[in-house]
């Protein structure tokens, strides 16, 4: 069974679109794409998501969350939604932050499973074929991707290394790549976690609450690629300072947080 799934996962064309794959799941999957000023990437990323999910998880929806973009990201998202009923465009009137965009997508999810990834082209949606089989086998409650070879500037990689160690120490998270935006989860579980982080702490809050809830995690390697266009904001000083403020607020909040008993099983 596993070898068959692996063969299916490898049947991917050079353009990153799945070719003649068989469905890996019959469960419904919501794909959340948070986007801020991604006019150069959002159409191609969405097209690849639709092509891939149509083959390996045909009961799906795509939710593009335009986080107050100043370019044509929102307009392009609306065009894509008009052309395909499986695509939904949601808009923030102003830029609220990465976490806020992810949470908006979670709140709008209508399928049994929710998956999210960045819209900037640094991930290949075809790698979701590495996450679905272990979920279907029951290896864990949540399947986490980690960037096998991270393709970011050296300073950003260094910052991420230091941040990971700080966060792991504060929250007891033993995860290879906390902030990797490539996660597959039961939608009900995400809703029970009730995440509120508006910025970079969204992944940390989500995983820290999962640990408190006794959720099992399984990690798989996924590809990571250089940005095709646009500009990353993770190394922006304002983003970093906001992340530190969120970090200490979250640490204080989690000291008194506990999930509702038997709230998602």
Image (tube, rainbow, N blue to C red):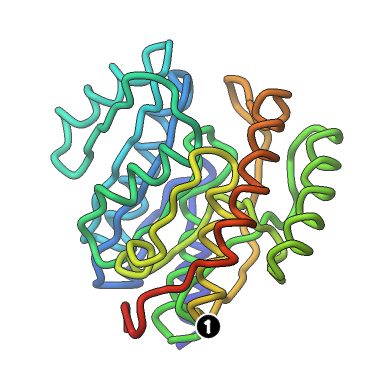
Instruction: State the residue at coordinates (59%, 53%).
Output: 250
Disc 1 target residue? 3
In this orientation, which residue lies closer to the viewer: 2 or 263?
263
Instruction: State the residue at coordinates (26%, 67%).
Output: 112
Look at the picture and state if 173 lies above or below 108. below
Sort mark 1 into few (<14), some (14-19) or many (20+) by Cα contacts within 10 Å. few
Q: How many marks?
A: 1
In this orientation, which residue lies closer to the viewer: 33 or 40?
33
Which type of secondary structure does the marked residue at label 1 adopt? helix
In this orientation, which residue lies closer to the viewer: 194 or 67?
194
- Residue 72, by quadrant, is top left
Q: Looking at the rendering, in which quadrant would you find the C terminus?
A: bottom left
Q: Looking at the rendering, in which quadrant would you find the N terminus?
A: bottom left
Task: Say whether residue 142 is left or right of residue 61.
Answer: right
- Residue 175, by quadrant, is bottom right
Instruction: State the residue at coordinates (63%, 26%).
Output: 233
Instruction: State the residue at coordinates (13%, 40%).
Output: 85
Q: Position of residue 222 (x, y in %)?
A: 62, 58
In this orientation, which residue lies closer to the viewer: 53 or 216?
216
Task: Say whether residue 192 is left or right of residue 244.
Answer: left
Look at the picture and state if 73 lies above or below 51. above
Q: Where is residue 158 in the image (x, y as percent from the top left)?
A: 86, 42
Instruction: Name the residue furthest top.
Output: 71
Q: Position of residue 113 (x, y in %)?
A: 32, 65
Q: Position of residue 34 (x, y in %)?
A: 43, 37
């Amino acid at each position: 069974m596993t070898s068959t799934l692996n063969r299916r996962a490898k049947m991917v064309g050079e353009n990153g679109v799945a070719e003649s794959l068989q469905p890996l799941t019959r469960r419904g999957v919501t794909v959340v794409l948070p986007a801020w000023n991604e006019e150069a990437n959002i159409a191609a990323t969405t097209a690849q998501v639709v092509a891939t999910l149509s083959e390996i998880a045909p009961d799906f929806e795509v939710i593009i969350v335009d986080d107050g973009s100043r370019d044509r990201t929102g307009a392009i998202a609306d065009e894509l939604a008009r052309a395909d009923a499986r695509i939904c465009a949601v808009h923030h009137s102003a830029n609220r932050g990465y976490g806020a965009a992810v949470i908006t997508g979670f709140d709008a999810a209508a399928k049994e499973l929710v998956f999210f990834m960045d819209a900037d082209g640094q991930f290949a949606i075809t790698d979701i074929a590495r996450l679905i089989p272990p979920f279907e086998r029951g290896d864990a409650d949540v399947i986490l991707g980690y960037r096998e070879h991270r393709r970011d500037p050296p300073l950003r990689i260094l910052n991420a290394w230091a941040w990971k160690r700080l966060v792991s120490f504060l929250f007891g998270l033993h995860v290879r790549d906390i902030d990797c935006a490539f996660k597959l989860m039961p939608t009900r579980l995400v809703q029970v976690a009730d995440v509120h982080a508006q910025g970079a702490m969204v992944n940390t809050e989500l995983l820290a609450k999962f640990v408190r809830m006794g959720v099992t995690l399984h990690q798989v390697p996924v590809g990571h690629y250089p940005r095709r266009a646009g500009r990353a904001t993770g190394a922006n000083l304002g983003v970093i300072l906001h992340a530190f403020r969120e970090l200490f607020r979250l640490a204080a909040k989690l000291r008194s947080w506990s999930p509702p008993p038997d709230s998602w099983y």
